C-alpha cells in the first residue's frame, strides 16, 4: 500500500472529529492530540482528560495554570485572543481586523469552503486564523501577531498571509519589534496556490524588516508545520518554542512512510529541534512573557553592550 492511501485511512481514531474540516497542508497528520483536547476544553464539563498523561484535570485549575497540565506539563493549545491576553499588558489594541477570505477558487471538498469559513467564524469569533495587536510586553512596545489553531487548523490562506504581512510592515514602519506566535497546520489547501503565494509575500516583508534592523521574535507553538514553518516561523532573530510543540514541514507519519523507517519518539518535537540547533530556546508558557521581556531588552541594547553582556 502506497502512502497516498494512508492519507485517507485512519486506524487509530485519535484525530478530532472533522468539524473544522481539513486543516493545513499537513492535514490530520499534525496536532491531533491537542486538537482533540482543545475541543474537549470547550465542552461544558468541569474536568478534562490530559492528552499527555491521561489524568483528569479540573478545568478551573487548568485555566489558572495557563492551560498547562500541572502533572505532566503538557501545553494545551491556546487561542489567539488568550495568547494576546497572556503576553500583552492590558489596554492593547487589535488592528488589521475585518479581512475576510473571498474563496477565490470557489472551493468545495466534502463541504463548501464558504461553509467551513462560516463555521470557523462561529466557533472562534474571529474572521480568520490570525489576530494582530499593538501593545506592550512589559515596558516594550511591540507588534504581536497570534495565530488561531481553532480556525481551520490555523491554516494560512490569503487573509492570514495579508494580516501577517501587515504586522511585519507595521513593525518596520513604526520600528517596534515584531513577535509572531505560530500555531498552524500549514498552507490552506482550499485556497490552493493563493496560499502558497503568501509564503513569498511574508518572506519578502521579513527581509525588508531585517534590512531595517527591527527585531523579530518567532514563537512556535503546537503545531507549527508546513508552509508556515517554511516561510516565517523559522526566520526570527530568535526562534523559540513551547515545550512539546510539534514543529516540521511534512508530518512525521508522511516522512516515516516515505523513508520507510521508524522515527524516534521525539522527532520534530521542540526539544529535539533545540538539541539539533534549529531553535534558540524552549520556554515553558509560564516563563514566556518574562523571557520575551529579557529578549527584547537584549535586542534593543546597542551591539557593544550586547557583546559585554554575552562575555561577562
Ligand atoms: Zn498531563
Image (cartoon, rainbow, N blue to C red):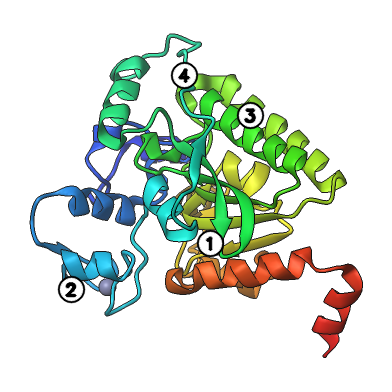
In the picture, which quadrant includes the C terminus?
A: bottom right
Examine the rendered structure and indicate whether residue 210 appears above or below residue 51: above
Examine the rendered structure and indicate whether residue 18 appears above or below residue 178: above
Residue highlighted by disc 1 = 268
Q: What distance separates the C-alpha of mark 1 from that of mark 4?
A: 31 Å
In the picture, which quadrant includes the N terminus?
A: top left
Q: What distance separates the C-alpha of mark 2 from that of mark 1?
A: 25 Å
Q: Nearer the viewer, mark 1 or mark 4?
A: 4
Tell me whether circle 2 and circle 1 mark residues in contact (CB < 8 Å).
Answer: no
Residue highlighted by disc 3 = 198
The residue at 54%/72% (across/down) is: 290
The residue at 47%/35% (across/down) is: 155
- Picture quarter containing residue 126? top left
- Is label 2 within 8 A of ligand 1 (CB to nearest ligand atom)? yes
Element under label 4? Answer: loop
Q: Earlier in the sequence, mark 2 or mark 1?
A: 2
Going by the image, does 8 lie left or right of 286? left
Q: Nearer the viewer, mark 4 or mark 2?
A: 4
Q: Earlier in the sequence, mark 4 or mark 2?
A: 2
Q: Earlier in the sequence, mark 1 or mark 4?
A: 4
| Numbered badge on residue 101 | 4
The residue at 49%/65% (across/down) is: 242
Q: What distance separates the C-alpha of mark 3 from that of mark 1?
A: 24 Å
Residue 64 in sight here: yes
- Graded by Cα atoms within 10 Å as few (under 14), some (14 to 19) or many (20 or more), the crowding at tag 1 reads many
Residue highlighted by disc 2 = 55
Q: What distance separates the C-alpha of mark 4 from that of mark 3?
A: 13 Å
Amino acid at each position: 500500500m502506497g502512502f497516498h492511501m494512508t492519507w485517507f485511512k485512519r486506524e487509530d481514531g485519535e484525530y478530532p472529529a472533522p468539524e473544522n474540516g481539513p486543516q493545513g497542508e499537513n492535514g490530520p497528520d499534525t496536532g491531533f492530540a491537542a486538537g482533540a483536547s482543545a475541543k474537549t476544553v470547550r465542552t461544558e464539563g468541569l474536568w478534562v482528560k490530559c492528552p499527555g498523561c491521561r489524568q483528569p484535570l479540573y478545568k478551573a485549575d487548568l485555566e489558572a495554570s495557563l492551560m498547562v497540565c500541572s502533572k505532566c506539563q503538557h501545553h494545551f493549545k491556546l487561542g489567539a485572543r488568550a495568547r494576546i491576553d497572556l503576553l500583552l499588558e492590558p489596554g492593547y489594541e487589535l488592528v488589521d481586523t475585518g479581512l475576510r477570505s473571498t474563496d477565490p477558487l470557489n472551493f468545495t471538498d466534502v463541504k463548501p469552503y464558504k461553509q467551513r469559513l462560516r463555521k470557523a467564524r462561529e466557533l472562534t469569533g474571529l474572521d480568520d486564523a490570525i489576530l494582530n495587536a499593538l501593545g506592550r510586553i512589559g515596558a516594550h512596545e511591540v507588534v504581536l501577531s497570534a495565530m488561531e489553531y481553532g480556525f481551520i487548523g490555523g491554516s494560512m490562506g490569503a487573509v492570514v498571509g495579508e494580516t501577517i504581512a501587515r504586522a511585519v510592515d507595521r513593525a518596520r514602519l513604526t520600528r517596534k519589534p515584531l513577535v509572531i506566535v505560530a500555531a498552524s497546520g500549514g498552507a490552506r489547501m482550499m485556497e490552493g496556490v493563493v496560499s502558497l503565494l503568501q509564503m513569498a509575500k511574508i518572506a519578502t516583508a521579513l527581509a525588508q524588516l531585517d534590512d531595517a534592523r527591527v527585531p523579530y521574535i518567532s514563537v512556535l507553538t503546537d503545531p507549527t508545520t508546513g508552509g508556515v514553518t517554511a516561510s516565517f516561523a523559522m526566520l526570527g532573530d530568535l526562534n523559540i518554542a513551547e515545550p512539546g510543540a510539534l514543529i516540521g514541514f511534512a508530518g512525521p507519519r508522511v516522512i516515516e512512510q516515505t523513508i520507510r523507517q521508524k522515527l524516534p519518539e521525539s522527532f520534530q518535537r521542540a526539544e529535539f529541534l533545540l538539541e539539533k540547533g534549529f531553535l534558540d530556546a524552549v520556554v515553558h508558557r509560564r516563563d514566556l512573557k518574562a523571557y520575551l521581556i529579557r529578549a527584547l531588552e537584549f535586542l534593543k541594547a546597542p551591539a557593544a553592550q550586547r557583546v559585554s553582556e554575552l562575555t561577562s
